[in-house]
Image (tube, rainbow, N blue to C red):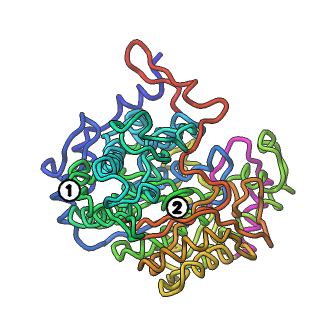
Amino acid sequence: MRSNESESKSRMKPIEEVAKKLGLDCSSLEKYGECKAKISLGKVLETKEKKGKLILVTAMTPTPTGEGKTTTSIGLCDAFNRLGKRAVVTLREPSLGPVFGMKGGATGGGKARLMPSDDINLHFTGDIHAVTAAHNLLAAMIDNRLHFEGVCGLIDCRAVSWKRVMDMDDRVLREIVVGIGGPLRGIARETGFEITAASEVMAILCLARDMKDLKERLANIFVGYSPDNKPVFARDLKAQGAMAALLKDAIKPNLVQTLEGNPAIIHGGPFANIAHGANSVIALRLALSLSDFVITETGFGSDLGAEKFFDIVIRTGLIPPPDACVIVATLRALKFHGGVKLDEVEKKNVGAVEEGFRNLQKHIENIRLFGIPSIVALNQFNSDTDEEIEKLKKLCKGENTRFAVSEVYARGGEGGLELAREILLSIDADEKNFRFLYPLELSLLEKIEIVARRVYGASSLAMEAKTRRKILKIEQDGFGRFPVCIAKTQYSLSDDDEARGRPEDFTLIVTDASLSSGAGFIVIFCGDIMTMPGLPRSPAAERIDITEEGEVIGLS
């Protein structure tokens, strides 16, 4: 028998037919086979001002397997097209780390999927590998300069901040020593690896307007300090041109299709727990100029991806505030945050739904902080009961929040019509008054505290003196007006991944800070967050295989 993936591939439309739905002709495409293509840079540069409505999809605090933001986003695209609207979904590219780690693939599920999903999950068009190469080229040029100039050259070998990256979960590479074995191997020093999704080059790719902006941002990357304690940038090593050359194709958005043959633009892949968590500005601008409705998701909950979309992406001035925001919830996540063990969340428990609602309630409040109307979307599972659904609907009504059940996993676009219609009602009737969470004129410490108190619900901040000095040094070097990008666990509103529900009266522990001067923000590390994840005890890689016919199996 043919697998579902094989059957789905047989129904895929030629990519030219999908492109026509967006008004794109063959001259705008650079094909990668019959069913995926890049949209040419010339077409990107012709991007006109926005005409579409932007719908942001976020979520409550997730369980380890996620609550279905991507599935919901894809299903919404299909639902809007069923309503006769020209709609496109714009998403991030999957990282091989989660694909082979805990979460598996990132192309949706059931009848709300992207195609060809295996290709998208595995290498795709090579964008993430290009980011890896550009990042590591800069690392190689730093060590090359150290090798030829020694400790008294441009860069202080003890103050290099630029690490290396790879697109895989590999915890043993978090801390390494390079250059050992003699003078021919460079200067020995401590460094490490991060996952490519956390690379500043990835953030730059996703925040740049065009190739000129990309090169300027790459030039402005901070790599460390000179022997006299002055900042050193990628432009000082003349690295930006070669880095941009490696990204010449990666800067172009990728066009694929949903299972129902509707257009999907996939581009970039920063995580939201350790990076800013949104797909590219280029993809969003292009989508908004070509369609009536654009559905995009940000990583994890409102405390991470959504806050960063509002306070970092929109601050570029290239993307307008969303017209509506969908908050994806599941009964299993509500019960998990209501105190139920993960292996028991499919059992009926109305009381736990009510208790866990406190977590969802905070995410509703967070979206309101930014003045954007929101709709709670219940991503429905087979184990959900009518009584539990009615309880959640009543709780949302008590918060004066719109609510809709989403059945896109089981029914595709048809299962998203209720949610799509509720979004249309919200766009027409609900007040929108967007505002940033903080002004850029505040100090970095004040910005961190505002996010901690207002978005996470913390009562105070704590950090060691060396971390405070590092943040103050960043300000003294002239970067105090940047927004902050807080890296913390996705499994809690706090920095403690064991703190479920709605933690209150807690102290946010700030452990480190780093300057992303090319991307234009300051990364603030909290709790035990790692920029290089590790594989779980039983990784998804153990279940992935390929048949003799070349068909990949085991990808979720």
Q: Secondary structure at mark 1?
A: helix
Question: Quadrant where the C terminus lies?
Answer: top right
Q: Amino acid at mark 2?
A: Val
In primary-sequence order, the first of circles 1 and 2 is 2
Q: Quadrant of residue 511?
A: bottom right
Q: Secondary structure at mark 2?
A: strand
In the rendered view, tell whether residue 364 sits above or below residue 545: below
The answer to if 179 sits in the magenta stretch is: no
One can see residue 371 in this view: no
Q: CA distance from mark 1 to mark 2?
A: 35 Å
How many numbered callouts?
A: 2
Foreground disc of the pair 1, 2? 1
Where residue 177 appears, as percent x and y from the top left, is 49, 41
Asked whether, in this view, residue 334 is left or right of residue 525, the answer is right
- Between residue 317 and residue 222, name the one nearer to us: 222
Furthest residue toward right: 351
Q: Amino acid at mark 1?
A: Gly
Label at residue 241 = 1
The answer to if 388 sits in the magenta stretch is: yes
The magenta segment: 377-399
For label 2, the residue is 57
